[in-house]
Amino acid sequence: MANLDDVDAAILAVLQNNARTSNRDVAAAAGVSPTTALERTRGLYERGVVTGARLDVSLPAIGRGVQALISVRIRPPKRTVLEAFRDWVATLPETLGVFVTAGDQDFILHVAVADNDALYAFVIDTLTTRPEIVDVRTSVVYEHLKRAVVAPTAVAPTARRAGDRGARPPTSAPTPL
């Protein structure tokens, strides 16, 4: 786990709410100078804490109004079989996410399709044609809430340099679930 302090946490909160926030606004929210904010943000990228910035898209607006979680069980449960399935299913245009899991199911797929007919076709015509699949269970998603800001589990206090103003909480509150 990366060693994060309260300035790093404040910068992460601001950028998770809006990755396009200007450096000047990030600095103001974190209570540091713009130079410090830029150095800290670059450091978060360099340490692998921030891995990229993404654009949220309305799935219904792009013709993918039906989401589902599909549990899949694979046999035989060999590494090569599991990894081949994981790599294949991740390339399908319907797939939003692939979770490799323990328990009764080997995978949980998060998919988005146009409608129920497209979901049925995906499950029956795409998934179940694979010989390694022995069980598929589909749950339609009525509503999908995502946490906008994920806070680090541990934050160390920051040692301040001259000129920095002391960290303040981010200017916008995290989006509740």
Image: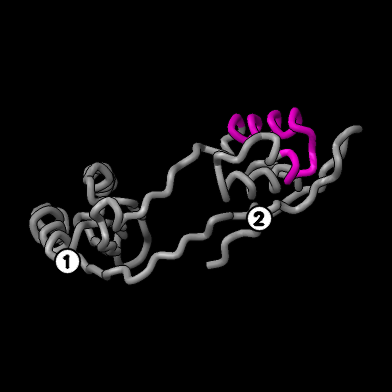
Q: Is residue 34 magenta?
A: yes
Dot 1: within a 10 Å radius of its alpha carbon, few (fewer than 14), some, or many (20 or more) residues?
A: some
**Magenta stretch: dominant secondary structure:** helix
Residue drawn at (23%, 51%) of the image: 94
The x, y position of residue 38, in whole percent, is: 68, 30
Residue type for callout 1: Asn
The x, y position of residue 26, in whole percent, is: 68, 40
Asked if 82 appears above or below 42 in the picture, the reply is: below
Residue drawn at (69%, 40%) of the image: 25
Q: Does the magenta stretch include residue 153?
A: no
Question: Which mark is first along the chain, 2 or 1?
Answer: 1
Query: Looking at the image, which is closer to me, 142 or 3?
Result: 142
The x, y position of residue 136, in whole percent, is: 19, 65
Residue at which label 1 appears:
116
Q: Is mark 1 on a helix, strand or loop?
A: helix
Q: What element carries label 2?
A: loop
Residue drawn at (57%, 36%) of the image: 48
Which of the 4 image quadrants contains residue 30?
top right
Quadrant housing the N terminus = top right
Q: Are marks 1 and 2 in contact (CB under 8 Å)?
A: no
Query: Looking at the image, which is closer to me, 175 or 89?
Result: 175
Residue at which label 2 appears:
172
Dot 2: within a 10 Å radius of its alpha carbon, few (fewer than 14), some, or many (20 or more) residues?
A: few
**Residues in magenta?**
27-46
Residue drawn at (31%, 60%) of the image: 108
Query: Looking at the image, which is closer to me, 28 or 50?
Result: 28
Which of the 4 image quadrants contains residue 55?
top left
Query: Looking at the image, which is closer to me, 125 or 19?
Result: 19
Q: In this view, does 56 lie to the left or right of 134?
A: right
Residue type for callout 2: Ser
Asked if 76 appears above or below 83 in the picture, the reply is: below
